[in-house]
Image (spheres, rainbow, N blue to C red):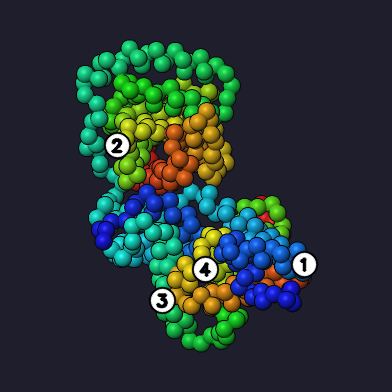
């Protein structure tokens, strides 16, 4: 360390961590240039910091168990995940009728888009873009018939589906629809928050033995997509939402689905 | 004072809380229990949180305290254990290396050696190097003077560097 400057260990750490106050930084830099040993020490600390981040950051991408997501809710809101079918309808009958025409226009487009081979997150983003922007007919069956919607989609996809409850994240179910996926049909659940911001969850059955995966992120034409595979099903959550926010919602989706699976009777 | 905590921010903080819990306990299952206990405590104490302040740092503080209390209880239960200041409460690191999810051998080494540091040094390293908290915030989390944080940081970095340099362990990355 430089002999003519009183540099403490504290200063060395603060400098390496980028936490040394602005006014002391210039003096420290000058000392660094004169003192290769000091420069090496700083470099070693920074390398260690980077290694620690690389070693411990992958944990952040792990899906969270439902118990933890449930524990984040205020105690009075903690209820079993089942038995809440009374979600208020978001649409009036009038908008429903007006929307039918627009819905059919959109349908032609998704078929064309589907003709091009594409990835799962891209498929999810395209499907989201197509229906979320539709003010009147974003869904085929509305949330006031959630029970019927879920039964119908479960039948068409041939496995038990569940529409996760995202109310705690500020999003309520609008409804859902069956979509023609790349290889097989998929189900889309649409959600909306108080600002009319929409997000959608695309679900499809994958081949048995498809390996489970951590959350992965893709940005497709400005639409963020978190997607993962769990229990031989592919899930993709899409929306024009900030990445961190979308990830937080994706974790809740994951927890809700795990809770539903644990509670569901085997079909 | 608020009667509630911002739930989306709380959910967003969960992965970091869970990571901190794993670093504290060195055990994946006990870590999740610690996160749950911390969240319960946070909701009890929600009126003490200042809206606009760093929720994450506040939660770390609660978690640190919950863990210290639980650890004290456990230590009293175990009849005797020789703990001196520096080779101190290494509560074991029962997290498999494959939990690191990395192919880089030196990262597996860093991970494994972290488990051999005393818990308060592990904490300081995670909070300073990985979470990039300010030193004053770390002092608040650990409830110690800032000088203690700095000397822990100094010792932790030096020790980790030496351990990773010396004796390349026969550690293999399990995929």
Residue position for label 3? B69
Q: Are marks 3 and 4 in contact (CB under 8 Å)?
A: no
Say which of marks 1 and 2 sits in front. 1
Say which of marks 3 and 2 sits in front. 2
Residue at the location (26% across, 19% down)?
A: A96
Residue position for label 1? A34
User: Distance between the Cα atoms at labels 3 and 2?
Assistant: 42 Å
Q: Which mark is residue B135?
A: 4
Mark 4 neighbour density, 10 Å: few (under 14) some (14–19) many (20 or more): many
Say which of marks 4 and 1 sits in front. 1
Residue position for label 2? A194
Quadrant location of residue A92?
top left
Q: Are marks 3 and 1 in contact (CB under 8 Å)?
A: no
User: Distance between the Cα atoms at labels 3 and 4?
Assistant: 23 Å
The foreground one among A179 and A11 is: A11
Q: Earlier in the sequence, mark 3 or mark 4?
A: 3
* Horizontal and vertical percent position of residue A246: 44, 41
* Horizontal and vertical percent position of residue A56: 58, 57
Q: Is residue B72 visible?
A: yes
**Looking at the picture, does residue B148 appear above or below residue B165?**
below
> Do the dots labelled 3 and 1 sit on one chain?
no
Quick one: quadrant of the N terminus of chain A? bottom right
User: Distance between the Cα atoms at labels 1 and 2?
Assistant: 59 Å
């Amino acid at each position: 360390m430089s002999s003519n400057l009183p540099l403490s260990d504290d200063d060395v750490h603060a400098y390496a961590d980028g936490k040394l106050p602005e006014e002391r930084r210039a003096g420290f830099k000058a000392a660094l240039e004169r003192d290769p040993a000091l420069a090496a020490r700083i470099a070693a600390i920074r390398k260690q910091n980077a290694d620690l981040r690389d070693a411990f950051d992958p944990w952040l991408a792990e899906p969270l168990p439902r118990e933890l997501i449930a524990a984040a809710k205020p105690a009075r809101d903690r209820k079993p995940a089942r038995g809440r079918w009374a979600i208020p309808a978001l649409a009036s009958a009038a908008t429903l009728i007006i929307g039918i025409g627009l819905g059919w226009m959109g349908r032609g487009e998704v078929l064309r888009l589907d003709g091009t081979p594409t990835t799962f997150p891209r498929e999810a983003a395209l499907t989201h873009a197509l229906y979320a922007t539709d003010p009147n007919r974003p869904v085929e069956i509305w949330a006031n018939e959630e029970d019927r919607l879920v039964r119908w989609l479960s039948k068409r996809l041939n496995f038990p589906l569940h529409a996760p409850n995202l109310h705690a994240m500020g999003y309520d179910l609008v409804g859902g629809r069956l979509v023609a996926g790349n290889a097989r049909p998929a189900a889309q659940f649409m959600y909306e928050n108080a600002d009319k911001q929409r997000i959608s969850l695309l679900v499809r059955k994958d081949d048995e033995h498809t390996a489970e995966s951590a959350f992965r992120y893709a940005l497709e034409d400005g639409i963020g997509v978190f997607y993962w595979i769990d229990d031989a099903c592919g899930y993709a959550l899409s929306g024009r939402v900030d990445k961190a926010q979308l990830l937080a919602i994706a974790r809740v989706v994951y927890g809700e689905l795990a809770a539903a699976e644990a509670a569901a009777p085997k079909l | 004072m608020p009667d509630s905590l911002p739930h989306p921010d709380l959910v967003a903080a969960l992965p970091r809380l869970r990571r901190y819990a794993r670093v504290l306990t060195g055990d994946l299952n006990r870590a999740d229990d610690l996160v749950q206990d911390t969240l319960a405590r946070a909701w009890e104490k929600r009126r003490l949180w200042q809206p606009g302040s760093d929720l994450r740092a506040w939660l770390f503080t609660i978690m640190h305290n919950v863990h210290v209390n639980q650890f004290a209880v456990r230590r009293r239960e175990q009849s005797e254990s020789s703990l001196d200041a520096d080779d101190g409460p290494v509560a074991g690191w029962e997290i498999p290396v494959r939990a690191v999810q990395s192919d880089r051998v030196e990262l597996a080494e860093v991970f494994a050696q972290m488990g051999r540091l005393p818990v308060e040094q592990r904490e300081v390293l995670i909070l300073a190097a990985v979470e990039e908290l300010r030193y004053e915030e770390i002092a608040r989390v650990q409830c110690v003077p800032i000088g203690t944080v700095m000397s822990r940081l100094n010792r932790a970095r030096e020790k980790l560097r030496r351990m990773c340099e010396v004796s390349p362990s026969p550690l293999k990355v399990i995929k």
